[in-house]
Image: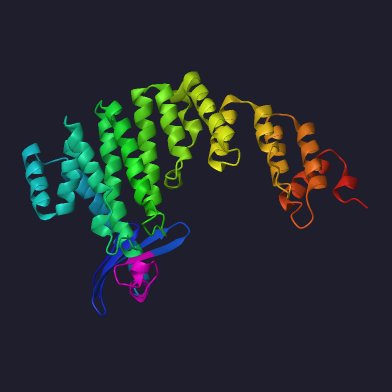
Amino acid sequence: MSALEIGERTITATVDGTDVYEVELTEHEDGLTGWCDCPYGQEGNFCKHCVAVGLAVLQQTESVPRHRAAATSRGRQLATWLETPSRDELLSLVKEHIAADHDLRRRLELRACAAGGDPGAVRERILALLDTRPFARYGYVEYADARAYGLQASEAISALRTLTETGRATEAVGLARTAIEALALTYGEIDDSDGIIGDVAAGLAAAHLEACLAAHPDPSQTADWLVDHLLSDLSHATDIPLSEYADVLKAMGLTREHERAAAALRENPMDWAAKDVMEQVLRMEGSVDALIALHSADLAPSGATHLLIAQELERAGRPAEALDWAERGLSEAEPGHGPDPRLVDFACERYTRAGRPADVDPP
């Protein structure tokens, strides 16, 4: 083992095994995680190389606080030093690292492009960042390559935010939608066991929302894009809560979403995606009775839907009706399917609150 370095929260080292492997241990509040570029480690396991590094650190436990303090001191010294060189000296340093680090060069080129004025170039680079082909050995991004792909794809988020921050939010809105759709198309071809790509998808959605809040795009057009996305097969990759877009949609956009969701349900009353959109819209409108009607049209035999309705009524300040629906669920639950234990708990808790212990444990 060599190059053991104890930082503020991370420990890195090089371990000699069948090959030479890089190891990184990271401390969290709830424990320790390890990363290693050996084949077993790349499958998501805490490999023997991680264990070896951990044991090496345990052997020098007494010196760990001193190493961490030194790491903190080095970080402060670096921050202080970066404020002292002249602009030309820093520029020379950056150019030096750009020449030696291809990934850094690509990231900075993208940021420069986003800060410039060529929309076509930015779009091309963002799509290139989201292209899985360089990481897909057999037409699929395996677990071992998902981390590297995720780090590259996350640069698209930075580029979109740069556009918004530099007064090009309208452009960022369109590019964010393109990026979300591009990632969604390939999401099923990536092993995202660690959720890295899911984080990228969430970041793209956040960048889209930020751009919309800054650009104030047409509410109806925004509503159409949101509904199209949520009703498509691509929505599984990116969770976009409609409630976050209330300030963007305004009354006009919300009305458009209602119309679109209603039309989709008329075409296919069993379309769960359309039902979910309508549920979100009705909740944004504050239409409790309409929301109850939506749920009551398809009651689960376990009583789970009755519970959902009861919870909506209770949130609306209608506890008596909520208990009525809970009791209805208990009586209508079909043998072999229910009642749902959560429904039972809900009713028992309300009986207790109402001072009706006999109903909690009937004879």
Q: Is residue 9 above or below residue 83?
A: below
Q: Is residue 339 above or below residue 254?
A: below
Q: Is residue 156 above or below residue 246?
A: below
Find out whether residue 232 is within the magenta segment: no
Q: Residue furthest top?
A: 252
What percent of the width, then of the height, locates residue 110?
Answer: 19, 41
Q: Quadrant of residue 124?
A: top left
Q: Residue furthest bottom?
A: 18
**Residue 264 in view, yes or no:** yes
Find out whether residue 38 is within the magenta segment: yes
Residue at left offset 27%, top offset 64%:
137
What percent of the width, then of the height, locates residue 225?
Answer: 41, 32
- Locate residue 103 relative to residue 244 in the image: left or right: left
Residue at left offset 37%, top offset 68%:
43
Residue at left offset 76%, top offset 58%:
336
Magenta extent: 34-55
Q: Is residue 122 above or below residue 107?
A: above
Residue at left offset 40%, top offset 25%:
221
Q: Residue furthest right?
A: 363
In the rendered image, the quadrant that contains the N terminus is: bottom left
Scheme by which the image is coloured: rainbow
What percent of the width, then of the height, locates residue 229?
Answer: 43, 38
What percent of the width, then of the height, locates residue 348?
Answer: 80, 46
Observer-nearest of 4 and 352: 352
Q: Quadrant of residue 28?
A: bottom left
Total labels: the figure holds: 0
Observer-nearest of 314 and 124: 124
**Residue 62 in view, yes or no:** no
